[in-house]
Amino acid sequence: MTGTVPSQAPNRVLVIANPTAGSASNALLSGVRQRCLAHAPTTLHVTSSQGEATESVQRALAEAHPPNLVVVIGGDGTVREVTEGMAGAAEPTLMIIPGGTGNSAYRMLWGERPWSAALASVFDGTAARRRLDLARLAETGALVFLGACSGVVAEALVYAKRTTLTGRARYAKALADAAAAFTPYPGRVVVDGATLFEGGTVLANVGGGRYRGGQYLLLPLSELADGLLDVVVISDQVPLAEVPDLVRGGDHLGVPGVYYGRGSHIEVLRTDGEQLVFEHDGELRQNVAAGMSMRVSPGALPVWCDPDVVKAGSW
């Protein structure tokens, strides 16, 4: 099976926790640490600034006895930072504990399984170990774990900061508010040198992960280890008010004005010369360039996941 790698029991654990993430409570951090300590020597590092997770993982992997299990507690942005720190390392395997708001990365690998059961399966040998495709963003050099999106999904991150709601309800309200105020931009999407779409653009999502915001099935056909990136474009032919409900269950595929493609190199561009507002892994990127360009890195990261997710055809 594509993406399969030999399993190895965790014998040294590094836990990286972001206490400012949406649902990363002290009780969660303590619970994860205690469960890991019951099976292997465990080091807990609590981050205090952006980028610290990447540096902490790099330092740990450079030690004489590095961890072979890296556990991250946080949201999708923290997961991406840890992934950056693991880049190029052959042995350590990533385990995600949902501690953010949307937790799309956790859902991608574990579905709706409780984190405690997921972590237990890593130690008892019933979890699946696979190699996940990643991508590299040309404009910044950043590694992309879950995916990147322009348009209304990126704008929703601005609205998310204005609501007091938490969890997935926060993103649901943010996307609805963004859709109500959004103006489509003139865009073009190019897949392996061929134009997939050009015109008024509501969103262009590239990945990677099937879900965004923990609940929106933007890339329902994406396979996590096929060596390719998927892209979906929703054009201004689709009424903006209908977009949140359509993408929640993947019902946008087949709708007139929706375009889907797959390739190893994908470009998302503005055609009016203005800078493209986009996000990747839940972090907003502005004032970068008139477009974003992503190239796949096949099988770049070993991860632990639910065997049922593997059987469901994501791999």
Image: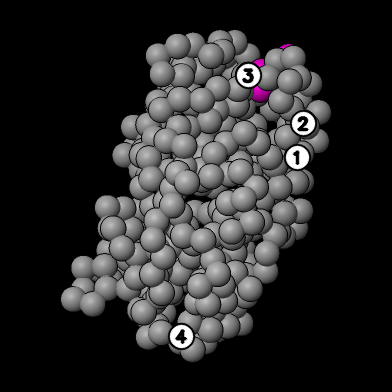
> Could you give the CA–CA distance between mark 4 and mark 3, rounded to whole angstroms?
47 Å
- The residue wearing badge 2 is 251
Q: What stretch is highlighted in magenta?
A: 234-238
Instruction: Indicate whether residue 235 is drawn in magenta.
Output: yes
Q: Would you place residue 186 above or below residue 122 in this image? A: above
Quarter of the image where one finds residue 244? top right
Q: Is mark 3 on a helix, strand or loop?
A: strand
Judged by depth in the image, the label closer to the viewer, 2 or 1, is 2
Q: Is mark 1 on a helix, strand or loop?
A: helix
Residue 212 on image: x %, y %: 63, 44
Tell me the amino acid under the disc marked 4.
His
- The residue wearing badge 3 is 259
- Whether residue 299 is visible here, answered yes or no, is yes
Indicate left or right for 51 with 37 as reference: left
What's the mark number on residue 267? none
What's the mark number on residue 39? 4
- The residue wearing badge 1 is 248
Tell me the amino acid under the disc marked 2.
Asp
> Could you give the CA–CA distance between mark 4 and mark 1, rounded to whole angstroms?
38 Å
Q: What element carries label 2?
A: loop
Foreground residue among 116 and 11: 11
Instruction: Indicate whether residue 61 is drawn in magenta.
Output: no
